[in-house]
Image (cartoon, rainbow, N blue to C red):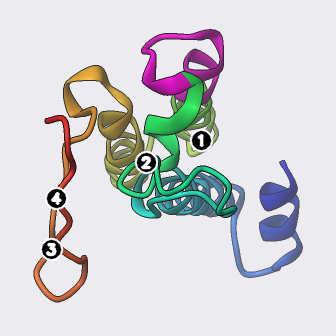
Amino acid sequence: MLLKFFYDLIPIYTNEISWTLTNVTYVIGSYIMFHQIKGTPFDFNNGAYDNLNMWEQIDNGAQFTPVKKFLLGVPIALFLISTHYSNYDLTLFVVNLVACLVVVIPKLPFSHRLRVNIPYLTDQQIVPGI
């Protein structure tokens, strides 16, 4: 909601655009925080989690825990809200849908420990236990 308030302060953005920007900004931040950065911020685990991203570390990798259900529901709810307040405009719907899918698909069980490497953008790492 703080993002929405921030985008509402900018006079050139309509309500539809501000909701879409709120959704896209949340998705980018969430993807980077939960799925792109590997390891832990503290070095007290002797490297046990160095090859795991934050999503794989939550609840020791157990699927469909209450925390993971909540974190999975937030981008879906934000997609529904932003689609509703953008008056179901087709262009904004597609932008919001793609943004939602970009952050929801990596959270599903079939993509646990699955890495997508983009040449020259992501580093190659071997994840043990696959």
Q: Which mark is residue 82?
A: 1
Residue marked by disc 4: 126
Q: Quadrant of residue 121?
A: bottom left
Q: Quadrant of residue 44?
A: bottom right
Whichever of labels 2 and 4 marks the residue nearer the N terminus, that label is 2
The amino acid type of the residue labelled 1 equals Ser
- Marks 2 and 4, Cα distance to the nearest angstrom? 32 Å
Q: Secondary structure at mark 4?
A: loop
Whichever of labels 3 and 4 marks the residue nearer the N terminus, that label is 3
Badge 2 vs badge 1, beta-carbon distance below 8 Å: yes
Region in magenta: 60-72
Whichever of labels 4 and 1 marks the residue nearer the N terminus, that label is 1
Number of labels in the image equals: 4
78 left or right of 130 in image: right
Residue marked by disc 3: 118
Which residue occupies the extreme bottom position in the image? 120
Residue marked by disc 2: 96
Q: Quadrant of residue 62?
A: top left
Whichever of labels 2 and 3 marks the residue nearer the N terminus, that label is 2
- Marks 3 and 4, Cα distance to the nearest angstrom? 15 Å
Q: Position of residue 4 (x, y in %)?
A: 79, 56
Q: Is residue 17 above or below residue 128?
A: below
